[in-house]
Amino acid sequence: MHSESKELTPAEKLWQIHLRLNDVFGHLSGHPRRDPMRELISTMLSHRTTHAKEEMAYFQMLERFPTWQEVIEAPVEELADALSPAKFPGAKAANIQKALRIIQQGHPDFSLDFLQDLDVPEAMAWLIALPGVGLKTATLVLLFNFHKPVFPVDTHVHRISQRVGIIGATVTHDKAHQIILDMLPKDALVLYNLHRHMLKHGQKICTWSQPKCEVCVLQNLCNYYADVRLKGIDQ
């Protein structure tokens, strides 16, 4: 296969990733996978935690404390115990309670629907001001639930972007959000599909250890394949 890893610009590579992964995984409608509050709290729980453990922690919390008011009023040690499948349950319990109190002050029904009416900078600033909420959590909520033109960078998106050569080796997750977004059309459905497809590709093919380069549809775009895997084969 002819290598395009050094011939295309990062933006051209990124668009090729979108087209190729869309063919592999299929076009997604962008329908929210869960309501905004669940997206927010679940993503707060997901830090350094597998999806299965995140889900377990979320449902254990709601089993013991079925309403957001009960979560707020729970002794923090008991909430942390309910969240124990997740990493750092004590810190996450404290942050979730603090975030819920802030949400309740302005929105007693715990609805985040008001974010739909805010522009992106306002909505991002409001979410990031919540304890325990960073760029990844804020962008996931805004893209998945409110179709705002933002681009979440999780560990899979970041790894693929570095290996292919979309971003440099020293670019952090936080800086990557804007760098990658600036290369893409401000179309929420395109951004949603690209994020979800890169996530799946990172889980199935471009894994952290022992990536399956030999079956990767991005092979001829990829700096990592050209510089590391091919050289290893030649030696």
Image (tube, helix red, strand yellow):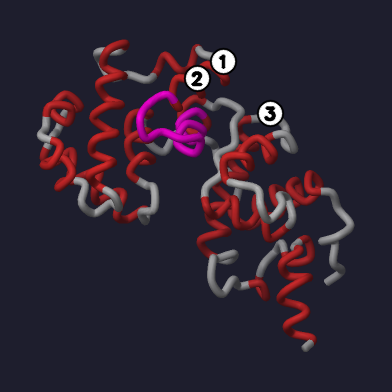
Residue sitting at x 63%, y 57%: 160
Label 1 crowding class (10 Å Cα cut-off): few <14, some 14-19, many 20+? few
Amino acid type at circle 2 is: Ala
Q: Which residue is mark 2?
A: 123
Given residues 117 and 45, the one toward you in this image is 45
Quarter of the picture holding the C terminus: bottom right
Asked if residue 133 is among those painted magenta in the image, a careful observer would answer yes
Q: Secondary structure at mark 3?
A: loop
Of the residues under marks 3 and 1, which one precedes in the sequence? 1
Could you tell me the amino acid type at mark 3? Lys
Q: Is residue 134 visible?
A: yes
Q: How many marks?
A: 3
Residue at numbered disc 3 = 186
Residue pictured at 51% horizontal, 13% vertical: 118
Sequence-wise first label, 3 or 2: 2
Which stretch appears magenta?
A: 129-142
Residues under labels 3 and 1: Cα distance?
A: 13 Å
Q: Would residue 31 be seen by someone viewing this image from the given angle?
A: no
- Give the alpha-carbon distance from disc 2 to disc 1, as whole Å: 6 Å
Say what amino acid the circle numbered 1 marks.
Answer: Asp
Q: Residues within 10 Å of mark 2 (few under 14, many from 20)?
A: some
**Label ID, residue 119:** 1
User: Do residues under tags 2 and 1 come within 8 Å of each other at their CB atoms?
Assistant: yes
> Element at badge 1?
loop
Asked whether 86 falls inside the magenta stretch, the response is: no
Residue 6 in percent (x, y) is at 86, 60
